[in-house]
Image (cartoon, rainbow, N blue to C red):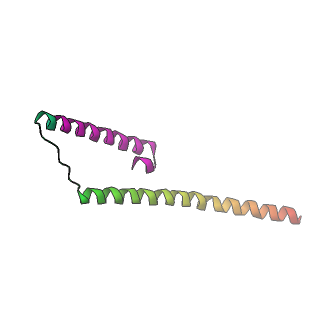
Amino acid sequence: MAKVANSDQLRAAFKKHAGETEGQVQRLQQVFKMMKQAPKGKTCPAILGLVEEGEEVMRISKILRRWMRAFCRAPRRLNITKYRVVDRLG
């Protein structure tokens, strides 16, 4: 999600959270090692769904921002085109 975050602050927050999560994983690995147990992972479909949905929302947000920038430029470009046509006719 950090890759598609729309601000430096949000991107930094995602990266910080990822670093904290990695630290938690390392601590859990140490605990399992001390207990002489092998960690067993289990995939949570609900979390995977939330991550996927979040990425989709951010992707759509990025597309909407680009569309809005283009939309806001349209009147200016139209006026420039009109002035050029008038200039060529005159």
Q: Is residue 67 found left or right of 19 in the rendered image? A: right
Q: Is residue 5 found left or right of 72 in the rendered image? A: left
- In front: 68, or 48? 48
Q: Quadrant of the C terminus?
A: bottom right
Q: Is residue 78 found left or right of 72 in the rendered image? A: right
- Residue drawn at x 42%, y 56% is 58
- Residue drawn at x 51%, y 57% is 65
Could you say where residue 23 lies in the image, as x and y percent from the top left?
26, 36
Q: Main secondary structure of the magenta part?
A: helix
Q: How many marks?
A: 0
Q: Residue furthest right?
A: 90
Q: Residue furthest left?
A: 35
Q: Is residue 86 found left or right of 9 in the rendered image? A: right
> Does the stretch in magenta take in 63?
no
| Residue stretch in magenta | 1-30
> Does the stretch in magenta take in 24?
yes
**Location of residue 66 (image quadrant):** bottom right
Q: Above or below — where is 66 with respect to 15?
A: below
- Residue drawn at x 74%, y 59% is 80
Could you say where residue 10 lies in the image, as x and y percent from the top left?
40, 45
Q: Above or below — where is 66 with respect to 21?
A: below
Could you say where residue 36 lies in the image, as x and y percent from the top left?
11, 36
Could you say where residue 37 lies in the image, as x and y percent from the top left?
12, 40
- Residue drawn at x 15%, y 42% is 38
